Image (spheres, helix red, strand yellow):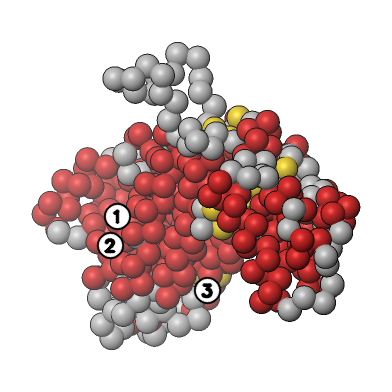
Amino acid sequence: MIPRYSRPEMVRIWEAESRYSIWFEIEAHAATAMADLGQIPKEAADVIWSKGSKARFEVARIDAIEQVTKHDVIAFLTHLAEIVGPEARFVHQGMTSSDVLDTCLNVQLKRAADILIADLDRLLEALKHRAFEHRLTPTIGRSHGIHAEPTTFGLKLACAYAEFHRAKDRMILARDEVSTCAISGAVGTFANIDPRVEEYVAKRMGLKPEPVSTQVVPRDRHAMYFATLAVIASSIERLATEVRHLQRTEVLEAEEYFSPGQKGSSAMPHKRNPVLAENLTGLARTVRAYCVPAMENVALWHERDISHSSVERIIAPDATVTLDFALNRLAGVIEKLVVYPENMRKNLDKLGGLHNSQRVLLALTQAGVSREDAYAMVQRNAMKTWEEGKDFLTELKADDEVVAKVPAADLEAMFDLGYHLKHIDTIFKRVFG
């Protein structure tokens, strides 16, 4: 993660100070549970809490110890012992490093998920507001990038709203999936630690006990989490790509807000580029890239190995920080998006009414013409519009074979824009309730 694409609240979750604070909480809660069970002196647990909770863990000191021990958890415990004193001998009783590391990681991922869910709420609010604002703003729908039939700009945004609402649901499920605690000792058998300690720590840390930890929390949980981040990133890219296409000069139906003093090009003073949407496309690629190593982390050797560790030290902060930044950037793009209804209507009318071709096709079949013949009749007139710039309705009315089946007055009635938009409210009710 780099400052350019980071927001402070998410970054704090992954800072060393935060990590050591969580490690201490896990160890101290475990000590309290052991004291309650009569396994260590209650006075020792009290000292661990009182001295440790007041301490400021020195990252540089822990790093220096790790240079000797070559083990990060032992380095932390050594530093904690320097703070706590003799009672530190009761810290980490029956526990293994993974108990601390995995429980801490899941706390961090849960907290990161909380932020991402709040980010999604902001984006959803922006999409809903702009969708209703442009609920009946007509625009041409495109398939393969080519004019198809009319839709509304509000419906485009409602579609994005529904997609990100699903993203929020998935993020909530991913948060629940990864919110487990493992305090089960070597190879996960609880041989040297009571399962009630795990239950206590889990409750205090806002987690639930991992049913079978095998010393590490099974990584299918984390794979699901990062897969969810990847899908959300893909949705970000889909909406960003839409903005990029709509901002093209030949289209210009919508564009990113261009602030006073902003510059679009070092060489060309006229430029107004979709830089935020392009940036979002790149950030989405980065988040998606972290999904594959998360999947590969699932297959660990036997009860545990640490091949996943180096991966997660990179992907956990990077993926969550990047997605947090991207979601907020996208929300800002939508909130300030400049929309040009007049250009939408101009583009809608650009092909001389060709967007009504299906309606004419259906009318001809209803009048008794075979679908193949009706298609040929409509297409030959449509091609005159494509190739010669003719008006589609005029050509249809001049086609004796067409008007023999569908009178000119009926053809004219078929070129009503409202026909295409009559069910917009029904769709909005489905999306927004």
The residue at 28%/62% (across/down) is 311
Quadrant containing the C terminus in the rendered view: bottom right
Give the secondary structure at mark 1: helix
Badge 3, how many Cα within 10 Å: few under 14, some, many 20+?
many
Q: Position of residue 65 (x, y in %)?
A: 17, 50
Q: Which residue is mark 2?
A: 311
Question: Looking at numbered disc 2 in the image, what kind of residue is underneath it?
Answer: Val
Q: Which residue is mark 1?
A: 314
Eye-nearest disc, 3 or 1: 1
State how far apart marks 1 and 2 are (Cα). 5 Å
72 or 401: nearer the viewer? 401
Quadrant containing the N terminus in the rendered view: top left
Give the secondary structure at mark 3: strand
Q: Is residue 325 left or right of 417 when viewed as pictured? A: left
The residue at 73%/47% (across/down) is 394
Identify the mark at residue 209; answer none if there is no mark: 3
The residue at 48%/33% (across/down) is 249
Q: Position of residue 127 (x, y in %)?
A: 66, 44
106 or 285: nearer the viewer? 285
State if disc 2 and disc 1 touch (CB < 8 Å).
Answer: yes
Q: Is residue 276 above or below residue 85?
A: above
State if disc 1 and disc 3 touch (CB < 8 Å).
Answer: no
Give the secondary structure at mark 2: helix
Q: Is residue 159 visible?
A: no
Q: Position of residue 338 (x, y in %)?
A: 60, 30
Q: Is residue 189 above or below residue 36?
A: below
Question: Looking at numbered disc 3 in the image, what kind of residue is underneath it?
Answer: Pro
Residue most toward the left? 68
Number of callouts: 3
Identify the mark at residue 63; answer none if there is no mark: none
Q: Is residue 401 left or right of 422 when viewed as pictured? A: left
